[in-house]
Amino acid sequence: MSKIRTRFAPSPTGKMHVGNLRTALYEYLIAKHEDGTFILRIEDTDQERYVDGAIDIIYRTLEGTGLIHDEGPDKDGGYGPYVQSERMASGIYLEYAKKLVEKGSAYYCFCTKDRLASLKKAVGNVDDDEEDEVKEIIKYDKHCLYLSKEDIEKNLADKIPYVIRQNIPLEGTTSFHDTIFGTITVDNEELDDMILIKSDGFPTYNFANVVDDHLMKITHVVRGNEYLSSTPKYTRLYQDFGWEEPIYVHLPLITNEDHKKLSKRSGHSSYEDLLEQGFLSEAIVNFIALLGWSSPNNTEIMSLSELIRDFDYRGINKSPAVFDMVKLRWMNGEYLKMMDEDDFYKIALPYIKEAIHKDLDYRRIASLVKTRIETLCDIGSMVDFFNELPEYDVEMFTHKKMKTNSENSLNALTELLPRFEALEEYNEASIESVIMSYISEKQIKNGQGLWPVRTAVSGKQSTPGGAYEIMSILGKDESLARIRIAIDKLSKAV
């Protein structure tokens, strides 16, 4: 087999959807596993859906995820241009479409919009992005296939708008093989004569990607299984041209936890959405790699280099893959724990500063939260008490396991306050010494001394760090002020 060449061919229509990113990742892994070539091609033939800035998103996403392409618009490997609208300037698509016309495998269609509208058939309740709506489809009736050569030449000379359609036989079957779904055969009568060249002169996605894949010597085509129904038409194009078909790898659907199509409204359907929610790029890539594939030894935490080493596209599962947000959060938390302290501090600092507007030891705060969060966005709600003591109920001082209640918490805080006030050196060690000496002296459980103090200085049920760490970060004046507030609250409640 020739050297593996895969391509990621996104359309610049907005954010990078999770499904598109998985396609890019699998294309990349297939190529790199065999020391092949990974190509970026921009498919911008659908000008109506083009979104300004979307190409920048594509580049930014590939760079951020480490899926560095070997060839592309910015890296000519001899098969350029790598942007379809630029390729169109040479007339390449129209040239190949006309070759099919000459063979009888395609034909000019001059039908008006009104005539096409008359062929519409309603099909009901097609699930699309969580909305049920009635859609209409057109099965073209080959009307223009039977135009005489003279009529065609006259229409072209009169500049009557036209499209070029594929000519699918009415009889027989078309078969293709997919690595995941096996051999699939369809009756030709079920296939429509799809448009190859649109009336604006642009090729359709379906036609352009077949031509480009052949000319760029693509060996493996990876895409979502929604393209299975279109693949017989691609197969016929390859057969009509006499070209060798690539290896097809159609990926399983990605669903949400309710087993419904992943919706753009879900808030986690795109790579940028996930970054905004505080997920690390490395964790996102790791998680997406496992949406339909698993490592031979069932390892779940895998770096990109480990994925390259172990990935085998033949092991992709055909069943729908569930986007489990709980699992992604867990995985992201594992990546955060593994981070270098300095690297973590750099990425955590903006989130800490957004929650705390005081001059405190941010590095110490970062070290406290590092092993306790699952996403960077968890930081704010975890550390905001450092900025300001929240309103809280004295019921928080009652904890059965710690054997604390409002009364013994009041006693502990009242007796500890003057000892804290007397500290000349105020730091974590001296605070710990005071509390532990008090516990030993009173012969009480550790929780009966620690729980009231931590609750008083944080006003929260759970915190990153205990009483010593929190009090040392807050400083003496703020810590003691908060303890006095707690004493006052408890005095009124007891």
Image (cartoon, rainbow, N blue to C red):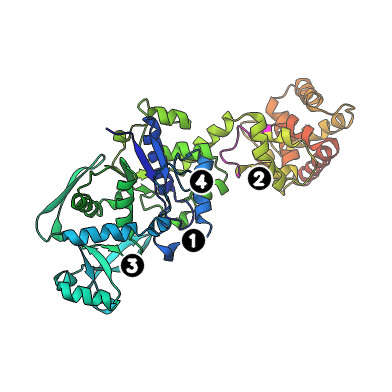
Q: Label 3 vs label 1: CA separation?
A: 25 Å
Depth-wise, is mark 2 or mark 3 nearer the camera? 3
Relative horizontal placement of residue 44, taking residue 217 as reference (left or right)? right
Relative horizontal placement of residue 105, taking residue 250 as reference (left or right)? left
Depth-wise, is mark 3 or mark 1 nearer the camera? 1
Check whether the beta carbons of the residues at disc 3 and disc 4 lie within 8 A of each other: no
Q: Main secondary structure of the magenta part?
A: loop
- SS assignment at label 4: helix
Depth-wise, is mark 2 or mark 1 nearer the camera? 1
Q: Position of residue 292 (x, y in %)?
A: 35, 39
Q: Label 4 vs label 1: CA separation?
A: 16 Å
Mark 3 or mark 1, which has the lower sequence index?
1
Q: Nearer the viewer, residue 410 or 34?
A: 34
Depth-wise, is mark 2 or mark 4 nearer the camera? 4
Mark 4 or mark 1, which has the lower sequence index?
1
Residue pointed to by mark 3: 133
Residue pointed to by mark 2: 380
Q: Nearer the viewer, residue 469 or 363?
A: 363
Q: Which mark is residue 69?
A: none
- Quadrant of residue 72 within the rendered picture: top left
Which amino acid type is marked by label 3?
Glu
Mark 2 or mark 3, which has the lower sequence index?
3
Q: Which mark is residue 61?
A: 4
Q: Magenta residues?
A: 367-377
